[in-house]
Image (cartoon, helix red, strand yellow):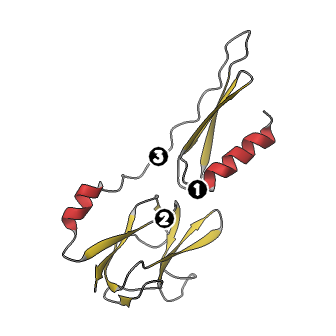
Amino acid sequence: MNIKEIKELMQMLVETDITELNLESDGTKIMIKKGVPGVVQPVVTVTPATAPAAVAPAPAPVQNAPAPEPAEREQKLGPNQEYVCAEIVGTFYRAPGPGETPFVEVGEMVEPGKTLCIIEAMKVMNEIESPFRGKVVEILVDDAEPVEYGQPLFVIEKI
């Protein structure tokens, strides 16, 4: 396996929800894991047939505190309230650009399909839309903060 093929595998990992990839081919073992949001850290172990050798793994990335477990999250929600969660890993932005008006504010009514925020992943701006009609009760993430897949971003009270 050449470096170009490894880079293609890394790119595939970044563009999908897959967090880990293990591959073995012709005595070469490759393990690629997602670490810090938007960064793929390859860990390559080569095991030739004659002598064992390994490349030391990359240092473990510093992780933010994990998002609350679903059971914990549900306890904090009021009646008819639901989370809108991150659909991808990236950087959270409340407005379309620096110094511009945020997409939504606390107390604002939203309709299905209304853009709530954008998450930047690999220089691509991904709009996160409201899945239902309701009132924005709480914005759980600060502007320009990294977010993880499934992390709660907003609390919306269904109407």
Q: Secondary structure at mark 3?
A: loop
How much space separates mark 2 and mark 3, taking CA atoms?
A: 21 Å
At horizontal 53% and vertical 66% (from top left) the residue drawn is 91
Query: Which of label 2 and label 3 is nearer to you?
Result: 2
Q: Could you tell me residue 7's position as x and y percent? A: 74, 45
At horizontal 61% and vertical 72% (from top left) the residue drawn is 125
The residue to which callout 2 is attached is 87
Query: Which of label 2 and label 1 is nearer to you?
Result: 2
Res 21 quadrant in image: top right
Residue 62's disc is 3
* Sequence order check, earlier mark of 2 and 1: 1
Decide: few, some or many residues near mark 1? Use Cα within 10 Å; few <14, some 14-19, many ≥20.
many
Q: Secondary structure at mark 2?
A: loop
- Between 128 and 59, the residue placed more toward the observer is 128
- Between 130 and 140, the residue placed more toward the observer is 130
Q: Is residue 10 above or below residue 117?
A: above
Q: Amino acid at mark 3?
A: Val
Q: Could you tell me residue 98's position as x and y percent? A: 56, 81
Q: Amino acid at mark 1?
A: Gly
At horizontal 71% and vertical 21% (from top left) the residue drawn is 27
How much space separates mark 1 and mark 3, taking CA atoms?
A: 13 Å
Q: Amino acid at mark 2?
A: Glu
Decide: few, some or many residues near mark 3? Use Cα within 10 Å; few <14, some 14-19, many ≥20.
few
Q: Could you tell me residue 47's position as x and y percent? A: 68, 19
Residue sticking out furthest to the top: 50
* Sequence order check, earlier mark of 2 and 3: 3
The residue to which callout 1 is attached is 38
Q: Is residue 74 above or below residue 62?
A: below
